[in-house]
Amino acid sequence: MQRAVLIGCGAMSRAWLAAAKTIDNLQIVGLADINPDAARARAAEFELGDIVIATNIEDLIAEAKPDVVFDVVIPGARHHIVSTALAAGCHVLSEKPMAETLDQARDLIARARAAGKLHVVVQNRRYLEGVRRIRNAIEAGAIGDVTSIHCDFFLAPHFGGFRETMDHVLLLDMAIHTFDAARFMSANVPEAVYCREWNPKNSWYKQGSSAAAIFEFGDGVIFNYRGSWCADGLMTSWESAWRIVGTRGTLVWDGHQDIRAEVAGQAIDGLFSEVAASEIPPLAESDRTGGHLGVMQDFIAATRGGPEPETVGHQNINSLAMVFGAIESAETGRRVEITI
């Protein structure tokens, strides 16, 4: 029986605890939050019994003696939480972003390696059926070689709390999901970015609720991102709306269930070519799905000797670098090369 604790008992902790309760031989033995009443409320909600309740990571680890730590704190506290847990000999599964800066991310990667422990990031969008099927379709050559990726993300959530006072809120808190999905689906790596960021006059966020970015990937592939968190009406899904253009055709995904592809055939009249539907492969048996649960299952399996999760820190830093490259570009008004 593995012993697990969770720190950060805000709204997101519900999804984490619900997933954890379904995993065999995993016991939640402690919760922590700067507001101990929030931790007690979660313990009662999930019927966790007489577990350790703490207000900081040091006391939580000392009293509960966990094998794994679930980190659901705000980004500003992440480096302290993860580094403390690793130093105590715990594996760590973190909310995104994995760090507030690339230097902090590099430091956490080094600490995890030195401790011989896992630090894995919850990029739960990778574990969506649509994302997996698109990756399979591209690998199968359904639209030829990818030449460009276009993504729209337009929603208007009123979160309250820390997000509405963050700098670069869209890029730092949300866009990494989309950036990571683009990197995964195309099996490519970012090389440079130009980004503009703004805050519309109707925005209820402090700063950076809207952004547009052009990323340069390897092999001449362009990834074009447009997004806003204060766009009421005709909203996209949380997974964005996608158009992926290849050398043979185009694939589109509405972010829900509709994935379609068409490929070019014979020229009709010299202006346009005929097009025909291209099949989108079904999920493979090896495909990992399940959102939060899928990530957590792979993480726990890895702590028990299974394969390294694909969202482990030394891989996820590539997606984080896209975020910080976009932020630097927005702040400086220039194209920024992305380096790890």
Image: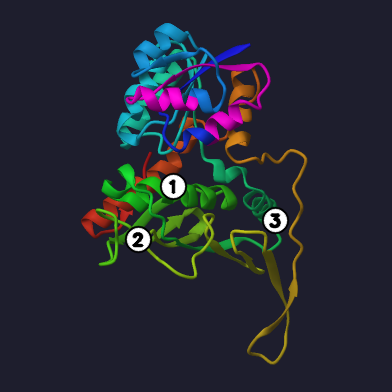
Question: Relative to 89, is 104 on the left or the right?
Answer: left
- In this rendered view, identify the residue nearer to me: 334 or 238: 238
Q: Is residue 37 above or below residue 267?
A: above
Identify the image quadrant of the C terminus.
top left
Residue matched to label 2: 211
Residue matched to label 3: 137
How far separated are the C-alphas under marks 1 and 2? 13 Å
Residue at image location 44% in from the left, 22% down from the top: 40
Q: Is residue 158 above or below residue 67?
A: below
How far separated are the C-alphas under marks 3 and 2? 29 Å
- Residue farthest to the bottom? 269
Q: Mark 3 or mark 2, which has the lower sequence index? A: 3
> How is the rendered protein coloured?
rainbow
Residue at image location 27% in from the left, 50% down from the top: 328
- In this rendered view, identify the residue nearer to me: 10 or 107: 10
Residue range (magenta): 15-42
- In reply to whether residue 27 is colored magenta, the answer given is yes
Tag on residue 176?
A: 1
Q: Amino acid at mark 1?
A: Ile
Badge 3: few (under 14), some or many (20 or more) residues near its Cα, within 10 Å?
Answer: many
